Amino acid sequence: MRKFLKRIWTNRSFCIDFALKGTGILFSIWETISLFAPGDELIDRSLPWITRLFMAVLIVIAIFIVVYIIGIAIVAFNNKIVLFDVADGHHVYVQYGDALSAEVLGKGSAPQRNILVSVNRCFDTIVDDDLISNMSLHGQAMNILYASHEYTEKSLNAQIKQKLANQQPVLLNQKDKPRGNLKRYEEGTIAEIKSTAGCTFFFLGLTSFDQMLHPHISDVEYGIALVRALQYCIERNQGYPVVFPLIGGGRAQTRKEEKDILEFIVKLIQMNRAAINCDIHIVVRESAKDSIPILKLKHNL
């Protein structure tokens, strides 16, 4: 109950706007009807004017409350919105859910999809809660590949190196980075790894490790990485949907609020909407329903 109330509070701006617009629309409809069927007898004209005014105010407040409750119901049950349409009948969605689950596309949808997953710029594959956390999207995605027995840490590392063979990395030493790979690629570099589970992972090089294996990224590097990521998704989607999580949110130390990341991704995609040639699902983690509103986004475009 507490989480639900917090979610309503987070979406209060949407609910208020919805109630104001809904109340206005209802009164506009009533005024139109009144042109043909006068409704001035709704309140007894024999009552004092102050009483009639008070009753009229109560009616307006009652209608506003009813419409506001409808807005609350929309917040409670709506986990996905179509943000806008793009070319060839494709859409850009914003939704709550698990970015790695096939259910994010909706029931009955084909499982084939591309998933953008941010990783460190050395493209490490060792998921041990030291180099890579099991709780991060990076770790979860790679564990999916390991659990299916398609790859081991070693074979996935070799496959990623092969995918990045034409890139020019910076060579590090173990003093700079005590564990893992010692080739660091440019921000926005992507290694494309296919899975027989029906998805292709676009592993996006985002953060750099320091000597304590803490990930970092500057604001400029972050912007460049997301621009390159979107361009890659446009060029390499093969007609399949792209799942676009909140890149740099969660455990990645980007020093950015997830709400700000969401707004940035939405604006970036909107600016490039003419080039979008597939469905894009911007996914907000399920546990953020009570802190990150999505319904208001469409009204802000």
Image (tube, rainbow, N blue to C red):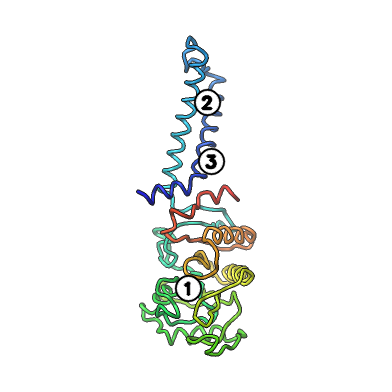
Foreground: disc 1 or disc 2: 2
Neighbour class for label 2 at 10 Å: few (<14), some, many (≥20)?
Answer: some
Residue 256: percent from left, percent from top: 55, 64
Tell me which corner region of the image, top left, top right, bottom left or bottom right, holds residue 109. bottom left
Give the mark nearest the N terminus, 1 or 2: 2
- Answer above or below: position of 212 versus 277: below
Neighbour class for label 1 at 10 Å: few (<14), some, many (≥20)?
Answer: some
**Residue for point 55% across, 50% down:** 298
Give the mark nearest the N terminus, 2 or 3: 3
Instruction: Look at label 1 and name its amino acid.
Output: Thr
Does residue 161 appear left or right of residue 5 in this picture?
A: right
What mark, if any, has residue 30 been given in the picture? 2
Q: Is residue 241 visible?
A: no
Q: Secondary structure at mark 3?
A: helix
Q: Secondary structure at mark 2?
A: helix
* Front residue (pair 175, 49): 175
Q: Disc 1 versus disc 2: distance between alpha carbons?
A: 54 Å
Residue 290: percent from left, percent from top: 43, 53
What mark, if any, has residue 200 been given in the picture? 1
Foreground: disc 2 or disc 3: 3
Q: Secondary structure at mark 1?
A: strand
What mark, if any, has residue 17 been given in the picture? 3
Residue 34: percent from left, percent from top: 54, 21
Instruction: Look at label 3 and name its amino acid.
Output: Asp
**Residue for point 45% across, 46% down:** 9
Residue 129: percent from left, percent from top: 40, 77
